[in-house]
Image (cartoon, coloured by chain):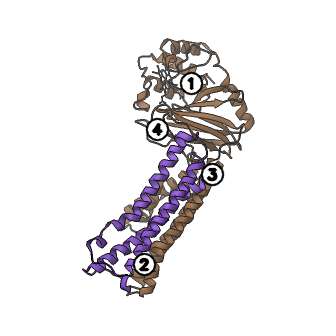
Chain colours: A brown, B purple
Amino acid sequence: MFRFHAFSTSSLHGFCPRSARTGRWGRNALWFTCLLTISFLITGCEGIQSALNPAGRDAALIAQLYWWMVGGAVIIWLIVVGLAVYALQINATEHDYNVTRFWVIGGGAVAPTIILTVLLVYGLSMMPTLLEPAPEGSQTITVIGKQWWWKVRYHLPEGQAVELANEIRLPVDEPVQFYLESADVIHSFWIPSLGGKVDMLPGRQTRLTLHPQRTGIYRGVCAEYCGGSHAKMSFEVVVMERDAFDTWLEQQQAPAKSASNELAERGESVFLAHGCGACHTIRGTKANGKIAPDLTHYGSRLRLAASALPQTRDALKEWIAHPKQTKPGVHMPSFALLSEDDLTALAAYLEGLQ
Amino acid sequence: MKLPPHEQTQSLWILVASPTIWAVHFLACYTTAAVWCAKMAETGGDLGAARWAIGVYTAAALIGIAIVGWRGFVRQSFEQVPPPFDADTIEDRVRFLEYAALLLSILSAIATIFVALAAVFIGTCD
Ligand SMILES: [Cu+2]
């Protein structure tokens, strides 16, 4: 996302000046492109997935480093281009040997060395803070990356754990300790608004500490190419007040509510009859599969299929019938053979699992 | 110092000496930290002894680079001829090589220090 933005910024320089000699239409098109680019830039800064709109301590530190680098780069660019314009346009004669020498050695070797040293020391001195583990007693969460979804395990104070999927909720103003693992290939866990990214490596456990500071909904992504549907492997992050978080976690620990109406009851039997339970768990029912997202409280999630689809009945029916349409290569079979009524019943049942 | 007009003084090896020390230093730091963290410490464990080892490697590397750099400095200033060293003579070839070796030594020293700085600031395996 940001690479794209960086690219658009540089293309701005080429596009926006009065280079339109192609008449009114061409000029309008150029202005339109400029406006579009600028609006992309602005929305990019404010989005739920922006590292430049920090909502946590660690993201704020990283954003600060970024702005120092942008500021520094702008100054250096101005000096370099200024000197080039001076030497080629304003004073295009032979220049004094010693002055030239000063600029070549000073600007070419000494200044970069000093600037790089300062940047390196500044960046490295941030690391101990970013790497510091959360204090004993903080909320601990294990997240396991799988092609192409997230298994989320909340550790409870009494030593048990509750297994959820594809959504992470956090209490505001508290450090949270993440343990990161992978079940297949290398993934990378990144919530740009809250902090830096950390790889998930098969056979190893990595760690990440985050300090959310603002309530709201953000988005986390997989930041390491992990196969065909890598780009569809995201998750919603909800930062909540402590009370609301406790209520939510309490509710997530409970087994699934039994179906509340006839349609949902039918959905439950379709679910069990078609073998969904071989892969998915719904606690409190016979479904206890371990290789797919836990669906016990599926209905409480904000989005569907690791954030690839909105949480609507149509999207859910579409997903069950043709999951590969949304996520190429997905490890869930298509259930296109189910009748429209069965699909509706299934969707009604799953939505009701609040 | 008189330069012996001999094939060996024109050897290119002196050019790559300092960058090689830098590369070996980097590799040594990297493998030491990796082996230490994988075999001796747990996740989030202390870098401890690996940091000391990196300190020793760095001192050794800087001494090696300094020797190469000093040799370069002395030889390039042979008879105090100012650059450019581009005449087709043994003397100028040697001056050129040693001058380049000196500059590369400065670069390698800075790079080696940059590598070591990571171990100064980061004390854990995370
Ligand atoms: Cu991925």
Dot 2 amino acid type: Val
| Badge 3 or badge 2: first in the primary sequence | 2
**Could you tell me which chain the residue with mark 4 belongs to?**
A
Dot 4 amino acid type: Ile
Asked if the residue at label 2 sits under 8 Å from ligand 1, the reply is: no
Q: Residues within 10 Å of mark 4 (few under 14, many from 20)?
A: many
Alpha carbons under labels 4 and 2: distance apart: 48 Å
Q: Quadrant of residue A71?
A: bottom right
User: Do the numbered discs 3 and 1 sit on residues whose CB atoms are within 8 Å?
Assistant: no
Q: Which one is in front, A49 or B46?
A: B46
Q: Position of residue A298 (x, y in %)?
A: 58, 26
Of circles 4 and 2, the one toward us is 4
As displayed, is residue A350 above or below residue A99? above
Q: Quadrant of residue A117?
A: bottom right
**Could you tell me which chain the residue with mark 3 belongs to?**
A
As displayed, is residue B97 above or below residue A124? below
Of circles 3 and 2, the one toward us is 3
Alpha carbons under labels 1 and 4: distance apart: 22 Å
Quadrant placement of the N terminus of chain B = bottom left
Left or right of A154 on screen, residue A330: left
| Badge 1 or badge 2: first in the primary sequence | 2
Alpha carbons under labels 3 and 1: distance apart: 36 Å
Dot 3 amino acid type: Pro
Same chain check for tags 4 and 2: yes
Residue A294, which numbered label? 1
Q: Residues within 10 Å of mark 2 (few under 14, many from 20)?
A: few
Residue that numbered label 3 is attached to: A128
Residue that numbered label 2 is attached to: A85
Left or right of A265 on screen, residue A175: right
